[in-house]
Image: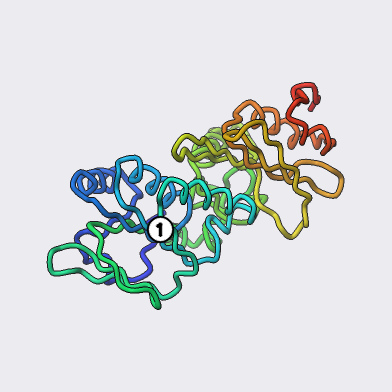
Amino acid sequence: SRARVPANTWKDIPNVVTLRDVQDCERLAKLLDTAQSVAIVGGGWIGLEIAATARKQGKTVDVFEYAERLCARSVSPEVSKFLYDIHTAQGTHIHLNSKNLHLIEASNGNVNVLNHPEPSRCYDCVVVGAGAEIAKELGVHAGLEVKDGIVVNRFGQTSDANIYAAGDVAIHPVLGYCIQSWANAQNQAIAAAKSMMGVATEYADIPWLWSDQYHFNIQILGTYQPELNPSLVVRQCSDTQISYLYLDAQQRLINMIAVNDAKLVKLAKRWIQNGTVLDPAQLTNPEFNVMKLKP
C-alpha cells in the first residue's frame, strides 16, 4: 500500500511528508530536529502517534481531521472521545470537520495551512496521515479478481489457483476488506506460505492492532461493528487503565479497546475464539478478577 495524499500538488511541497517507509521516517526525523510547529493532516492512528511524538519533543502540534471524530472508521464514539481528551490534555490542537483544507508552500520554505473558515496558519512541516491506497496493480495486470484489494480465500489463494496474496493488498477472507496492520501482514503471510508449500493452512486470526501514544498502550481486538448495535461495557481499573468492551445480543465479545491492559487482551482473544458468554456486571467491577472467567 501507499500513503494517500489528497491533493497531488501537496507532493511537490518540500516540507510536506508522509509516513509509510523507512525513507519517510528518516525524512520526518530530520524535519523534526529543527521544526517547532507541526501540522498533521489526518486524525487516524498514524496521525495521532506522530502528534504524540512531536508533543513529547515540545513542538506545537495541530491535527486536522476530515471527519467529525478521531479514528472514526475503526473505533466507537466513546473511544474517539477518549483519544481526543488525552491529546488535548497534552496540548495538541485538534480541528475536526476539516473538509476544506489547502496546503501552500510559503516563501521561507514553511507550509501555510488553510482550513476554511479558520484563518491561515504557518507550520515548519506538515505530515499527511490520510490513510493508504492499496497497491493492487499487480493483481489487476495478472487478471485476478480484484475489488478494493485482491480477493483471496482463507488460504491466501487468489482467483488463480497458482497465485497467492497476503498482507495489506489482500482482502480479508471473512471481513471483506483489507486489514492494514502489522499482525495481519505477518500472520496472513505465514498461513499463505504454508499453503503454497502444500500444507493447507487457514488464516482465521482475530484482527488485532496496537498504538502507543504518550503513556498509553492502546490495543484493539476485533472490529468495530456498529450495525450489530452492540452493548458497551466499560471496565476502568484506574485513571490510566480502562477498557471498552462491545458485546453482541448474546453477551459475547465482538470488539474491545483496552488501554494499558495487555493481560485482558490475551484473555479476550480466547473469549472471542470460544464465543464465551460474559456477565457485564462482573466486567464493570474493577475488583473482580476477570482471570476467573474461563474462555
175 with respect to 71 (left or right)? right
Residue 49 location (% of width, % of height): 42, 45
**Depth order, front residue of 77/23:** 77
Residue appearing at x 35%, y 45% in the figure: 55
Residue 186 location (% of width, % of height): 50, 36
Residue appearing at x 25%, y 57% in the figure: 125
**Depth order, front residue of 281/226:** 281
126 with respect to 230 (left or right)? left
Residue appearing at x 54%, y 36% in the figure: 187
Q: Quadrant of the N terminus?
A: bottom left
Query: Looking at the image, is 245 positioned above or below residue 130?
Result: above
Query: Looking at the image, is 172 positioned above or below residue 208?
Result: below
Query: Looking at the image, is 91 positioned above or below residue 142?
Result: above
Q: Quadrant of the C terminus?
A: top right
Residue lying farthest left?
108
Residue appearing at x 62%, y 37% in the figure: 258
Label 1: element kind: strand
Residue 151 location (% of width, % of height): 57, 56
The type of colouring in the image is rainbow
229 with respect to 187 (left or right)? right
Residue flagged by tag 1: what amino acid is it? Val
Query: Looking at the image, is 188 positioned above or below residue 292?
Result: below
Local packing at callout 1 (Cα closer than 10 Å; few below 14, some 14-19, many 20+) is many
State which quadrant residue 11 falls in: bottom left
State which quadrant residue 38 falls in: bottom left
Give the residue at mark 1: 63
**Depth order, front residue of 14/150:** 14
